Image: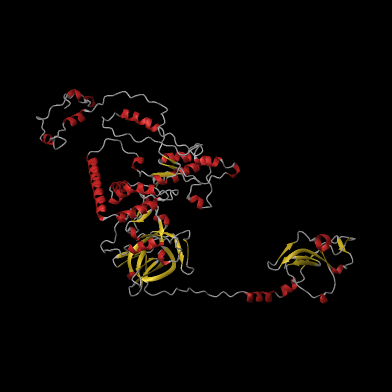
Amino acid sequence: TTRKFLEKEVFKTDQHVAIPLNQVLGRCCVLSVKDYFRSRPENFEEKDVYVCESRYSSKARAFKKIKNWPQSLNNGYKLLPRDENLEPKRVMSVFRERVEKHKEEIAELEEREKLVEKDKPNVPLQTEEAVTYFEQYNGNGFVIKTGDCVYVKTDTDGKAISQIDSIWTNAEGEAFFHGPWLVLPSAIPHTPSRTFYKQEVFLSTLEDTNPTNNIVGKCAVLEHGEYISCRPTEIPENDVYVCESQYDEARRSIKELPREGLKKYTHSAAVTQDEIYFFRRLINPQKVGANQTEQESKTNQYLQNFDQNSCSASSPANNIKLEDMMCDDSMDGGPRSVGSCHGNDNSNMSTPLTSKKKRDAKKLVTGYILYSGDVRKGIAADNPACSFGEVSRMVGNEWRNLPTSEKIAWEEKAARVNEETVAKMAEAELCPSPSPAPTPNSQQHPDLVYECCWDNCDWQFEDMQDCIEHAVTEGCGHVHMYFAAVPPHELEFQCQWRGCTRMRKAMIAPFPSLHRLARHVKEVHIMKSQGRVVHPDHRSKNFMPSSRPPPPPPSTSTPPSISETAAAMAPGLLNYSRNTPSPASQNGGGSTGGRIVEPLFVTVPPRPQRLLHSEAYIKYIEGLHSDSRSVSNWDRQLKASQETIEPPDMARLPAHWLGNGVGNHGNIL
């Protein structure tokens, strides 16, 4: 009410109205505040001329000055200068007196328009009486807590997996738990070609409440990151599952778990936490078809023996089967190379115990193996167009058609060969050979080859080192030669190794440099590859035998000294020079056998030195007799006294170690 206004002032508002033309009484003119005091419109009376300085907002109930007056409002008339400029006069609102007069009535109306604030009472939640919730609960001889996964007995005498989300007891003391279900692959619709982990389950969108009396055992459901790195120690391996997807029961569709994964639970200090065993190296679980997972789930023993005195199950370290879970041993080796499409069950494993068993198993033969080795070459020569599998089928048919007497003869021959093998092994264990330890090449399968899977390359190598040199040698390797032919503006260092996972993921950026790509090929695709067993008849025409010389025959002479051994090893180390030509440097087919590269430096023959033994070692050697039952003369030492012990030589004792102090004490003994 304190605002002053210009005479004949109007305001531009945000309100728009539509009026019929028959209600229009005449024309008027609205000028801006800049033109009103200096000019006047032509053919307009003074009473029909108004001034506009501000706009009015009906929502904010506020005035705001107009900075830029629209030129379109001045196009309908011509402005003439005034004979005398008008003086701006501001006066009080004509409605002020009216507002002051009816101020009490306006206040009463505003009071009526206000919203009435109702009292909002405290509304308690209607819960069941005598209901107690638990974080950890003991029942039926076992302990469960929120977050645990359990086996639940169903109406069809089957077992389902459920996760415990809450635990409570009612007024009668009956215990219940509520949580979501986890379903096996056999219970959901999927394509026949879809593969699953051996112990994979899916988090269902359905939740249910069950009494704790229906729990028949405990299990563990881990996310993929936990499944490959750790295990709960009180859960057997057959009861540990992996979950990385969610199954929507309404839409009957599978989708990935949310970013936070399975629901995490926090407990108070009074709750006993699970003991977790972490692997030294991550495992690489295999995926199999749905039929195999269903068969394995039927053979698993779900029931667990819970004792009231001890509710701990056996440790997974004693229950894990190497052939089921440690196919890529978590303790000893990394995952297989993605470039090796064909698995090799005969290749050596990294675990020493497993590799020893495989080597022993190879040395035992059967009658069929001897028969196959005898007739296979003849059948293959008579049927050159047949593949390796067809030849094997022919050999099997001939073996089945043999009379029983011939089969018995072959089995007896195999038994004699096995007896000789066992005798040789026992003799080797009793009298170990002084020959040097065999190299990794001598322990591998004789038909094992390493393939170069870069682009369309079909080169095969007997030695892994030759394959590495062929693929990633600086300048002349296959990888370097491949990118040398690519124009610079199209150069992207993408891995072209067949079967590489980076080729299936379109969002992965290329390598920043050729050196990083070569390192990736060497460490991921070649060094982690187990190779592939290829029969000599099915090898590529670009097969390259090993360029390294065969190991020397075992020596029975006197073992050389340390310096002689070092000198003998030096030329062998220099023989690892590259001798396998790459496709860019070779014009013809594969060469036959590699030549030994001469060493660049010839070492000086070592000077013979006499080996000196300590006096204690000499006495030990002299005290060894064939008729002696012990190493030391313990009975003589047991009866030792000052009279029976020979006095030591004073000159050989370290008398200078002892200080005389304030004076000479005489005999140091």
Q: Is residue 569 visible?
A: yes
Side of 597 where 557 appears, left or right: left
Q: Nearer the viewer, residue 237 or 459?
A: 459
Side of 478 where 238 appears, left or right: left
Q: Is residue 331 visible?
A: no
Q: Nearer the viewer, residue 25 or 303?
A: 303
Side of 357 where 30 appears, left or right: right
Name the quadrant containing residue 160.
Answer: bottom left
Label count reads 0
Residue 43, position as x, y percentages in the image:
89, 66
Q: The N terminus lies in which quarter of the figure?
A: bottom right
Name the quadrant containing residue 596.
Answer: top left
Residue 667, position as x, y percentages in the image:
16, 24
**Coloring scheme used:** secondary structure
Side of 36 where 361 appears, left or right: left
Q: Nearer the viewer, residue 196 or 614?
A: 196
Q: The C terminus lies in which quarter of the figure?
A: top left
Residue 441 lies, with reference to residue 326, above or below; the image says above
Residue 174, position as x, y percentages in the image:
33, 73
Residue 325 lies, with reference to residue 627, above or below; the image says below
Residue 446, position as x, y percentages in the image:
36, 43
Residue 348 lies, with reference to residue 74, above or below; the image says above
